[in-house]
Amino acid sequence: MLSIAVFTECYHPMRNGVVVSVASFARVLAALGHNVTIFTAQHPDMDGPEEGVFRFPSFTFPLQVVYPLALPVATGKARKLLKFEHFDIIHSHSPMLMGHVAVSYHRRRNIPLIFTYHTLMEEYTHYVPLPQAWVKKRAINLSREYSNTSDHVITPTIHVATRLRQYRVYKPISVIPTGIDLDLMDLLPDRDLRSELGIPAHAPLLAYAGRIALEKNIPRLISAFRLVLQQEPDTHLLLIGGGPEEPMIQQLCEDYGIADHVRMTGFVSRELVAQGLRQADVFIFASETETQGLVLGEAMACHVPVVAVNAEVTQELVTNGREGFLVPDADGPFADAILILLRDPRLRAEMGQRARQRAESISAFRCTERLVEIYQRTIEDLRWTMTR
């Protein structure tokens, strides 16, 4: 069994795709008998000590979302552990400050370093209030330099792997998505969210899950939904998640006169996301900047067919006409695809069943087994190199 040191800027109580990925792989690795130790930043909202998690001092910028950045100096138990514990492999999930701690430890102890590249950083530079051409160039340079420092890079999709090659990353790259937690989708008790949120029991329900943020293209969902309501006026839309654009989306719904058919949950637990997805008839998704689109797989695990904007990442999860529909980023085609599914229960059920089968093919267990293979191969490669 392996002893694995995981370094990540993002971890509970934060809520984003990186946290889901780190926690999911750590859970399944532990279930497989491996020892996982997570090193991350202190968070002002964390609630007491956590087994197997060691926090670095951090600082927080005054932003809408609390996003601590670790100070790259270990203290207390983390310092002792990094000094005396033997780890077989280091797995970094960040090219930022915690990522630099991982590189330093990798070099000092000559332990192989795996890096998961979660986010196409150049697609998110609008959050940095500096000249965008310069910021995008820096994002690409950081992505390339950090990836080439590692021994092996993991990406969640082929699309991201291709982009890294375009950045001139020459290290080995493997595509391993964040696996779908089928137990979370299947074993949670049912919850009558429709009643709690004031959605009629038998009303057709569309759902989106994820951050309410600029890059998610949620105005497309709202404007397409407005067209759906003109033909199916009982339909409701559930937006599961929170984010900086919540006030803008709420105002947009009011401007369109459809606010009484839209429910927004704000930030919620992973369990409530799954329970919300179970309630949906169709999952809708318009983002074109995803590195994986994990929520697509989670919706599919709940037997929910998908209508999504046709993008490289969604093509890796959804085959048009099989698990749902992939459409242009335009109101009319998006609304038309939704209406086809709402009006044809048999087609909706067939696509939902095929969606579930696709989700099972990328379960958390299967993806973690592939990750362990990468760990073992990288360790053996280093041993072979040292004995030459």
Image (cartoon, rainbow, N blue to C red):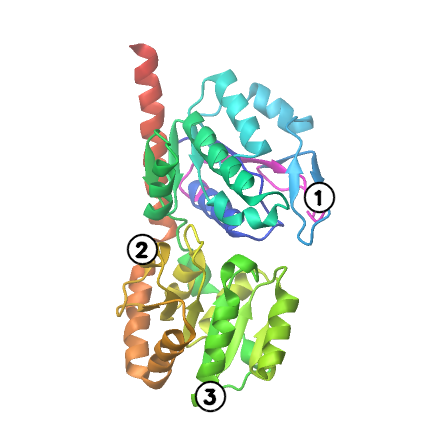
Q: Disc 2 versus disc 1: distance between alpha carbons? A: 35 Å
Task: Say what amino acid the circle numbered 2 marks.
Answer: Glu
Task: Say what amino acid the circle numbered 1 marks.
Answer: Phe
* Label 2 environment density (alpha carbons within 10 Å; few <14, some 14–19, many ≥20): few
The residue wearing badge 3 is 230
Q: Quadrant of residue 343?
A: bottom left
Q: Quadrant of residue 357?
A: bottom left
Tell me if residue 38 is in the magenta stretch: yes
Tell me if residue 93 is in the magenta stretch: no
Task: Say what amino acid the circle numbered 3 marks.
Answer: Gln
The residue wearing badge 2 is 316
Q: Disc 1 versus disc 3: distance between alpha carbons? A: 44 Å
User: Can residue 343 be seen in the rendering of this structure?
Assistant: yes
* Label 3 environment density (alpha carbons within 10 Å; few <14, some 14–19, many ≥20): few
- Estimate the x, y position of residue 341 in percent, counting from the top left: 34, 79
- Compare marks 2 and 1 and give the one earlier in the sequence: 1
